[in-house]
Image: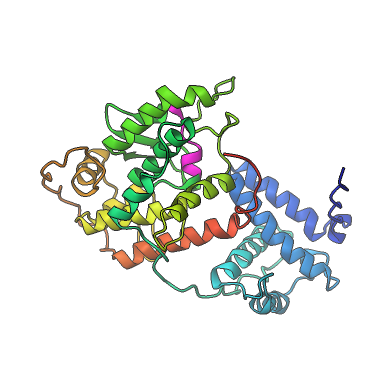
Protein backbone atom coordinates (compact mmCIF):
# COMPACT_ATOMS: atom_id res chain seq x y z
CA UNK A 1 0.00 0.00 0.00
CA UNK A 2 1.46 3.34 -1.05
CA UNK A 3 2.01 6.31 1.20
CA UNK A 4 -0.87 8.80 1.44
CA UNK A 5 -0.55 12.05 -0.44
CA UNK A 6 0.88 14.81 1.77
CA UNK A 7 -1.67 17.35 2.91
CA UNK A 8 -1.39 20.81 1.42
CA UNK A 9 -0.13 23.16 4.15
CA UNK A 10 -2.64 25.61 5.57
CA UNK A 11 -2.05 29.11 4.15
CA UNK A 12 -0.59 31.54 6.64
CA UNK A 13 -3.34 34.04 5.83
CA UNK A 14 -5.95 31.46 6.92
CA UNK A 15 -4.77 32.02 10.50
CA UNK A 16 -5.53 35.73 10.28
CA UNK A 17 -9.18 36.70 10.97
CA UNK A 18 -9.00 39.16 8.06
CA UNK A 19 -6.40 37.32 6.00
CA UNK A 20 -6.35 36.96 2.21
CA UNK A 21 -7.36 33.29 2.39
CA UNK A 22 -10.24 33.91 4.80
CA UNK A 23 -11.67 36.54 2.49
CA UNK A 24 -11.16 34.22 -0.47
CA UNK A 25 -13.41 31.62 1.16
CA UNK A 26 -16.07 34.30 1.69
CA UNK A 27 -15.70 35.41 -1.93
CA UNK A 28 -16.21 31.85 -3.19
CA UNK A 29 -19.32 31.51 -1.03
CA UNK A 30 -20.60 34.79 -2.47
CA UNK A 31 -20.12 33.43 -6.01
CA UNK A 32 -21.96 30.19 -5.22
CA UNK A 33 -24.88 32.00 -3.57
CA UNK A 34 -25.28 33.97 -6.80
CA UNK A 35 -25.29 30.76 -8.85
CA UNK A 36 -21.98 31.15 -10.63
CA UNK A 37 -21.05 27.86 -12.27
CA UNK A 38 -18.89 25.51 -10.23
CA UNK A 39 -16.26 25.62 -12.95
CA UNK A 40 -16.04 29.40 -12.60
CA UNK A 41 -15.77 29.12 -8.82
CA UNK A 42 -13.02 26.48 -9.01
CA UNK A 43 -11.05 28.44 -11.62
CA UNK A 44 -11.16 31.61 -9.52
CA UNK A 45 -10.18 29.69 -6.40
CA UNK A 46 -7.11 28.30 -8.20
CA UNK A 47 -6.06 31.61 -9.72
CA UNK A 48 -6.51 33.70 -6.57
CA UNK A 49 -4.90 30.92 -4.52
CA UNK A 50 -1.75 31.19 -6.65
CA UNK A 51 -1.61 34.92 -5.95
CA UNK A 52 -2.10 34.34 -2.21
CA UNK A 53 0.78 31.82 -2.16
CA UNK A 54 3.01 34.34 -3.94
CA UNK A 55 1.96 37.10 -1.50
CA UNK A 56 2.54 35.00 1.62
CA UNK A 57 6.06 34.17 0.43
CA UNK A 58 6.67 37.92 0.63
CA UNK A 59 5.10 38.35 4.05
CA UNK A 60 1.82 39.86 2.84
CA UNK A 61 -1.14 38.18 4.56
CA UNK A 62 -4.02 40.68 4.52
CA UNK A 63 -5.89 42.44 1.67
CA UNK A 64 -5.15 45.91 3.04
CA UNK A 65 -1.41 45.22 2.69
CA UNK A 66 -1.67 44.67 -1.07
CA UNK A 67 -0.71 47.67 -3.20
CA UNK A 68 -0.84 48.50 -6.88
CA UNK A 69 2.98 48.17 -7.28
CA UNK A 70 2.79 44.76 -5.66
CA UNK A 71 0.14 43.60 -8.14
CA UNK A 72 2.30 44.91 -10.98
CA UNK A 73 5.23 42.90 -9.62
CA UNK A 74 3.02 39.80 -9.59
CA UNK A 75 2.13 40.48 -13.21
CA UNK A 76 5.83 40.68 -14.09
CA UNK A 77 6.36 37.43 -12.16
CA UNK A 78 3.77 35.69 -14.36
CA UNK A 79 5.51 37.01 -17.47
CA UNK A 80 8.82 35.43 -16.45
CA UNK A 81 7.50 32.21 -14.86
CA UNK A 82 8.21 29.00 -16.76
CA UNK A 83 6.13 25.82 -16.93
CA UNK A 84 7.50 22.33 -16.32
CA UNK A 85 8.46 21.99 -20.00
CA UNK A 86 10.42 25.26 -19.91
CA UNK A 87 7.90 27.29 -21.90
CA UNK A 88 6.59 30.65 -20.78
CA UNK A 89 2.94 31.18 -19.91
CA UNK A 90 0.91 32.30 -22.90
CA UNK A 91 -0.81 35.69 -22.79
CA UNK A 92 -4.11 33.87 -22.27
CA UNK A 93 -2.55 31.86 -19.45
CA UNK A 94 -1.47 35.06 -17.76
CA UNK A 95 -4.95 36.54 -18.20
CA UNK A 96 -6.44 33.36 -16.71
CA UNK A 97 -4.39 34.00 -13.55
CA UNK A 98 -4.75 37.79 -13.37
CA UNK A 99 -8.43 38.22 -14.25
CA UNK A 100 -9.75 36.45 -11.13
CA UNK A 101 -7.32 38.41 -8.93
CA UNK A 102 -8.67 41.66 -10.32
CA UNK A 103 -12.26 40.45 -9.77
CA UNK A 104 -11.38 39.40 -6.20
CA UNK A 105 -10.09 42.85 -5.25
CA UNK A 106 -13.04 44.52 -6.95
CA UNK A 107 -15.31 42.41 -4.73
CA UNK A 108 -13.27 43.26 -1.61
CA UNK A 109 -13.70 46.96 -2.37
CA UNK A 110 -17.46 46.59 -2.85
CA UNK A 111 -17.66 44.76 0.48
CA UNK A 112 -15.91 47.75 2.11
CA UNK A 113 -13.00 45.55 3.17
CA UNK A 114 -10.77 47.98 1.24
CA UNK A 115 -11.21 51.73 0.94
CA UNK A 116 -9.84 51.67 -2.61
CA UNK A 117 -9.16 48.98 -5.19
CA UNK A 118 -5.41 48.46 -5.84
CA UNK A 119 -6.24 46.35 -8.91
CA UNK A 120 -8.55 48.90 -10.57
CA UNK A 121 -5.86 50.11 -12.97
CA UNK A 122 -4.21 46.73 -13.53
CA UNK A 123 -4.08 46.20 -17.30
CA UNK A 124 -4.36 42.59 -18.45
CA UNK A 125 -1.93 41.34 -21.13
CA UNK A 126 -3.12 41.82 -24.69
CA UNK A 127 -4.10 38.50 -26.21
CA UNK A 128 -3.43 37.68 -29.82
CA UNK A 129 -6.32 37.08 -32.17
CA UNK A 130 -5.64 33.92 -34.13
CA UNK A 131 -7.36 31.13 -35.99
CA UNK A 132 -7.78 27.58 -34.62
CA UNK A 133 -4.75 25.34 -35.12
CA UNK A 134 -6.57 22.60 -37.03
CA UNK A 135 -9.88 22.25 -38.83
CA UNK A 136 -11.11 19.09 -40.53
CA UNK A 137 -12.45 18.94 -44.06
CA UNK A 138 -15.71 17.11 -44.75
CA UNK A 139 -13.83 14.06 -46.08
CA UNK A 140 -11.55 14.03 -43.03
CA UNK A 141 -14.53 14.17 -40.68
CA UNK A 142 -16.12 11.22 -42.49
CA UNK A 143 -12.89 9.26 -42.05
CA UNK A 144 -12.96 9.86 -38.30
CA UNK A 145 -16.66 9.01 -38.05
CA UNK A 146 -16.13 5.71 -39.83
CA UNK A 147 -13.58 4.44 -37.28
CA UNK A 148 -15.81 3.17 -34.42
CA UNK A 149 -16.81 -0.49 -34.67
CA UNK A 150 -20.60 -0.13 -34.62
CA UNK A 151 -21.03 -3.90 -34.06
CA UNK A 152 -19.79 -3.28 -30.51
CA UNK A 153 -21.78 -1.38 -27.85
CA UNK A 154 -18.86 0.97 -27.20
CA UNK A 155 -18.29 1.57 -30.89
CA UNK A 156 -21.99 2.32 -31.38
CA UNK A 157 -21.90 4.76 -28.49
CA UNK A 158 -18.75 6.42 -29.86
CA UNK A 159 -20.25 6.77 -33.35
CA UNK A 160 -23.37 8.44 -31.93
CA UNK A 161 -21.19 10.68 -29.74
CA UNK A 162 -18.94 11.78 -32.62
CA UNK A 163 -21.93 12.36 -34.90
CA UNK A 164 -23.48 14.59 -32.22
CA UNK A 165 -20.32 16.66 -31.88
CA UNK A 166 -20.03 17.13 -35.64
CA UNK A 167 -23.71 17.75 -36.24
CA UNK A 168 -24.27 20.32 -33.50
CA UNK A 169 -20.87 21.76 -32.54
CA UNK A 170 -21.79 21.68 -28.85
CA UNK A 171 -19.11 22.04 -26.20
CA UNK A 172 -17.57 19.13 -24.33
CA UNK A 173 -19.36 20.03 -21.10
CA UNK A 174 -22.66 20.38 -22.96
CA UNK A 175 -22.28 16.92 -24.50
CA UNK A 176 -21.56 15.41 -21.08
CA UNK A 177 -24.75 16.95 -19.67
CA UNK A 178 -27.06 15.81 -22.48
CA UNK A 179 -30.12 13.90 -21.30
CA UNK A 180 -32.25 11.30 -23.07
CA UNK A 181 -35.07 13.75 -23.59
CA UNK A 182 -32.92 16.63 -24.81
CA UNK A 183 -33.16 15.30 -28.38
CA UNK A 184 -36.44 16.24 -30.07
CA UNK A 185 -36.63 13.84 -33.01
CA UNK A 186 -39.86 15.32 -34.35
CA UNK A 187 -38.53 18.87 -34.54
CA UNK A 188 -34.95 17.86 -35.30
CA UNK A 189 -33.51 19.87 -32.44
CA UNK A 190 -31.21 19.41 -29.46
CA UNK A 191 -31.77 21.24 -26.16
CA UNK A 192 -28.64 22.45 -24.38
CA UNK A 193 -29.84 23.00 -20.83
CA UNK A 194 -26.68 24.31 -19.20
CA UNK A 195 -24.46 26.02 -21.70
CA UNK A 196 -21.64 28.39 -20.93
CA UNK A 197 -22.69 30.96 -18.37
CA UNK A 198 -25.75 28.87 -17.49
CA UNK A 199 -27.49 29.87 -20.73
CA UNK A 200 -29.90 27.44 -22.40
CA UNK A 201 -30.34 27.18 -26.15
CA UNK A 202 -31.97 24.98 -28.77
CA UNK A 203 -29.98 24.04 -31.88
CA UNK A 204 -30.69 21.88 -34.93
CA UNK A 205 -29.29 18.35 -35.06
CA UNK A 206 -28.87 16.51 -38.35
CA UNK A 207 -30.96 13.54 -39.44
CA UNK A 208 -27.95 11.21 -39.59
CA UNK A 209 -26.90 12.06 -36.04
CA UNK A 210 -30.46 11.49 -34.80
CA UNK A 211 -30.56 8.03 -36.40
CA UNK A 212 -27.25 7.03 -34.80
CA UNK A 213 -28.45 8.29 -31.41
CA UNK A 214 -31.67 6.30 -31.77
CA UNK A 215 -29.71 3.17 -32.62
CA UNK A 216 -27.34 3.71 -29.69
CA UNK A 217 -30.23 4.24 -27.25
CA UNK A 218 -32.11 1.16 -28.42
CA UNK A 219 -29.17 -1.25 -28.91
CA UNK A 220 -26.31 -0.11 -26.66
CA UNK A 221 -27.33 2.22 -23.86
CA UNK A 222 -29.29 -0.46 -22.01
CA UNK A 223 -26.15 -2.62 -22.02
CA UNK A 224 -24.11 0.18 -20.45
CA UNK A 225 -26.75 1.29 -17.96
CA UNK A 226 -26.19 0.66 -14.26
CA UNK A 227 -29.35 1.39 -12.18
CA UNK A 228 -30.58 3.83 -11.13
CA UNK A 229 -31.00 5.53 -14.49
CA UNK A 230 -30.06 9.21 -14.14
CA UNK A 231 -31.21 9.99 -17.69
CA UNK A 232 -27.75 10.89 -19.00
CA UNK A 233 -27.54 10.17 -22.73
CA UNK A 234 -23.93 9.05 -23.19
CA UNK A 235 -22.66 6.55 -20.60
CA UNK A 236 -19.21 5.14 -19.82
CA UNK A 237 -18.55 1.43 -19.35
CA UNK A 238 -19.38 2.00 -15.68
CA UNK A 239 -22.85 3.30 -16.50
CA UNK A 240 -22.14 6.89 -15.46
CA UNK A 241 -21.74 10.23 -17.18
CA UNK A 242 -18.38 11.02 -18.77
CA UNK A 243 -15.82 13.20 -17.07
CA UNK A 244 -14.04 15.83 -19.19
CA UNK A 245 -10.62 14.12 -19.22
CA UNK A 246 -11.69 10.65 -20.38
CA UNK A 247 -14.04 12.14 -22.98
CA UNK A 248 -11.22 14.26 -24.37
CA UNK A 249 -8.94 11.21 -24.55
CA UNK A 250 -11.65 9.16 -26.29
CA UNK A 251 -12.28 11.69 -29.05
CA UNK A 252 -8.58 12.51 -29.44
CA UNK A 253 -7.86 8.81 -29.88
CA UNK A 254 -10.16 8.59 -32.91
CA UNK A 255 -8.64 11.71 -34.48
CA UNK A 256 -5.14 10.25 -34.05
CA UNK A 257 -6.20 6.85 -35.43
CA UNK A 258 -7.47 8.56 -38.58
CA UNK A 259 -3.85 9.62 -39.32
CA UNK A 260 -4.83 12.97 -40.77
CA UNK A 261 -1.74 14.79 -39.58
CA UNK A 262 -4.01 16.92 -37.40
CA UNK A 263 -4.60 16.98 -33.66
CA UNK A 264 -7.56 17.91 -31.54
CA UNK A 265 -10.51 16.56 -29.63
CA UNK A 266 -14.07 17.70 -28.92
CA UNK A 267 -13.37 21.34 -29.79
CA UNK A 268 -11.99 20.30 -33.18
CA UNK A 269 -15.53 19.35 -34.27
CA UNK A 270 -16.78 22.73 -33.07
CA UNK A 271 -14.25 24.48 -35.29
CA UNK A 272 -15.15 22.17 -38.16
CA UNK A 273 -18.88 22.85 -37.93
CA UNK A 274 -18.30 26.61 -38.07
CA UNK A 275 -15.98 26.20 -41.07
CA UNK A 276 -18.17 23.90 -43.18
CA UNK A 277 -21.32 25.94 -42.58
CA UNK A 278 -19.46 29.14 -43.47
CA UNK A 279 -18.04 27.54 -46.62
CA UNK A 280 -21.52 26.44 -47.67
CA UNK A 281 -22.94 29.94 -47.35
CA UNK A 282 -24.32 30.25 -43.81
CA UNK A 283 -24.52 33.76 -42.43
CA UNK A 284 -21.99 34.30 -39.66
CA UNK A 285 -24.68 35.35 -37.18
CA UNK A 286 -26.51 32.04 -37.59
CA UNK A 287 -23.27 30.22 -36.82
CA UNK A 288 -22.87 32.33 -33.69
CA UNK A 289 -26.35 31.27 -32.59
CA UNK A 290 -25.50 27.64 -33.34
CA UNK A 291 -22.35 27.80 -31.21
CA UNK A 292 -24.11 29.51 -28.31
CA UNK A 293 -22.08 32.71 -28.26
CA UNK A 294 -24.18 35.37 -26.55
CA UNK A 295 -21.62 37.87 -27.80
CA UNK A 296 -18.10 37.95 -29.18
CA UNK A 297 -15.38 39.90 -27.46
CA UNK A 298 -14.99 42.13 -30.50
CA UNK A 299 -18.66 42.70 -31.30
CA UNK A 300 -21.80 44.16 -29.92
CA UNK A 301 -24.80 41.98 -29.03
CA UNK A 302 -25.87 40.44 -32.32
CA UNK A 303 -29.35 39.83 -33.68
CA UNK A 304 -31.09 36.79 -32.15
CA UNK A 305 -32.61 34.41 -34.70
CA UNK A 306 -35.56 32.06 -34.29
CA UNK A 307 -35.03 28.31 -34.18
CA UNK A 308 -37.16 27.92 -37.33
CA UNK A 309 -34.91 30.23 -39.34
CA UNK A 310 -31.82 28.62 -37.81
CA UNK A 311 -33.08 25.14 -38.77
CA UNK A 312 -33.67 26.30 -42.35
CA UNK A 313 -30.16 27.71 -42.71
CA UNK A 314 -28.66 24.66 -40.97
CA UNK A 315 -30.44 22.27 -43.36
CA UNK A 316 -29.18 24.26 -46.33
CA UNK A 317 -25.54 24.54 -45.24
CA UNK A 318 -24.54 21.55 -43.10
CA UNK A 319 -23.50 18.45 -45.13
CA UNK A 320 -24.82 16.02 -42.49
CA UNK A 321 -28.20 17.68 -41.97
CA UNK A 322 -29.98 15.33 -44.41
CA UNK A 323 -29.36 11.74 -45.49
CA UNK A 324 -30.29 12.77 -49.04
CA UNK A 325 -29.24 16.25 -50.12
CA UNK A 326 -32.20 18.49 -50.96
CA UNK A 327 -32.36 21.78 -52.77
CA UNK A 328 -31.35 24.63 -50.51
CA UNK A 329 -34.25 26.74 -49.22
CA UNK A 330 -34.14 30.46 -49.70
CA UNK A 331 -32.06 32.08 -47.00
CA UNK A 332 -34.33 34.04 -44.64
CA UNK A 333 -33.65 37.75 -44.38
CA UNK A 334 -31.75 39.06 -41.39
CA UNK A 335 -32.46 42.14 -39.37
CA UNK A 336 -29.87 44.85 -39.93
CA UNK A 337 -29.62 46.04 -36.33
CA UNK A 338 -26.37 44.26 -35.56
CA UNK A 339 -22.94 45.29 -36.72
CA UNK A 340 -21.51 43.00 -39.37
CA UNK A 341 -19.15 40.40 -37.98
CA UNK A 342 -16.32 38.64 -39.74
CA UNK A 343 -15.28 35.02 -39.89
CA UNK A 344 -11.91 35.98 -38.40
CA UNK A 345 -13.63 37.34 -35.30
CA UNK A 346 -15.73 34.18 -34.92
CA UNK A 347 -12.77 31.82 -35.30
CA UNK A 348 -10.66 33.96 -32.96
CA UNK A 349 -13.37 33.54 -30.34
CA UNK A 350 -13.44 29.79 -30.99
CA UNK A 351 -9.67 29.56 -30.59
CA UNK A 352 -9.85 31.43 -27.29
CA UNK A 353 -12.59 29.08 -26.12
CA UNK A 354 -10.40 26.09 -26.96
CA UNK A 355 -7.49 27.63 -25.06
CA UNK A 356 -9.74 28.06 -22.05
CA UNK A 357 -10.63 24.36 -22.13
CA UNK A 358 -6.94 23.47 -22.36
CA UNK A 359 -6.07 25.83 -19.49
CA UNK A 360 -8.73 24.53 -17.11
CA UNK A 361 -8.40 20.87 -18.02
CA UNK A 362 -4.71 20.60 -18.83
CA UNK A 363 -4.43 17.36 -16.91
CA UNK A 364 -6.98 15.56 -19.09
CA UNK A 365 -4.38 13.23 -20.60
CA UNK A 366 -3.38 12.01 -17.15
CA UNK A 367 -6.87 12.03 -15.64
CA UNK A 368 -7.93 8.57 -14.55
CA UNK A 369 -11.12 6.71 -15.37
CA UNK A 370 -12.21 4.36 -18.09
CA UNK A 371 -14.60 5.12 -20.93
Percent position (x, y) of residue 81? 68, 76
Nearest the camera: 138 or 269? 138
Q: Where's residue 206, x and y in %?
A: 28, 39
Q: Position of residue 277 (x, y in %)?
A: 26, 53
- Residue in the image at 33% along x and 44% along y: 167
Number of numbered callouts drawn? 0
Q: Which residue is at the far top?
A: 227
Query: 371 or 119, which lies in front?
Result: 371
Q: Is residue 198 visible?
A: no
Residue located 54% across and 49% down the image: 249
Q: Give the side of residue 140 with respect to residue 365, left or right.
A: left
x and y percentages locating residue 95 in the rendered image? 58, 68
For the stretch drawn in magenta, the main secondary structure is: helix
Q: Which region shows up in magenta?
A: 173-180
Residue 314 visible? yes
- Nearest the camera: 155 or 93? 155
Residue 54 falls in image quadrant: bottom right
Queried whether the magenta region covers residue 291, the answer comes back as no
144 relative position to 48: left or right: left
Which of the two residues, 140 or 289, is positioned nearer the viewer here?
140
Image quadrant holding the C terminus, namely: top right
- Taking the spot 63% from the left edge, 47% from the top edge, the residue there is 31
Q: Is residue 184 left or right of residue 175?
A: left
Which quadrant of the rendered structure holds the N terminus?
A: top right
Placement of 327 over or under 298, stated as above or below: above
> Is residue 343 shown above or below 255?
below
Amino acid sequence: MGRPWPKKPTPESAKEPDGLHVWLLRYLEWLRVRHYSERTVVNREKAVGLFIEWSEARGVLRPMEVTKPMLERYQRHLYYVRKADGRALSARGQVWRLGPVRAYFKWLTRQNVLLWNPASELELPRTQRRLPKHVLSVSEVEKVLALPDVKDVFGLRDRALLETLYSTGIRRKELIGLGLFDIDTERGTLHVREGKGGRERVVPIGERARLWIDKYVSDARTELLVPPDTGVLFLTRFGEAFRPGPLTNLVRGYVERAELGKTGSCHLFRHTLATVMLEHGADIRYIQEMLGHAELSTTEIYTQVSIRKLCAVYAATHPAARLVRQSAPERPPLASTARAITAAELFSCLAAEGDEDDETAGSSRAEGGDT
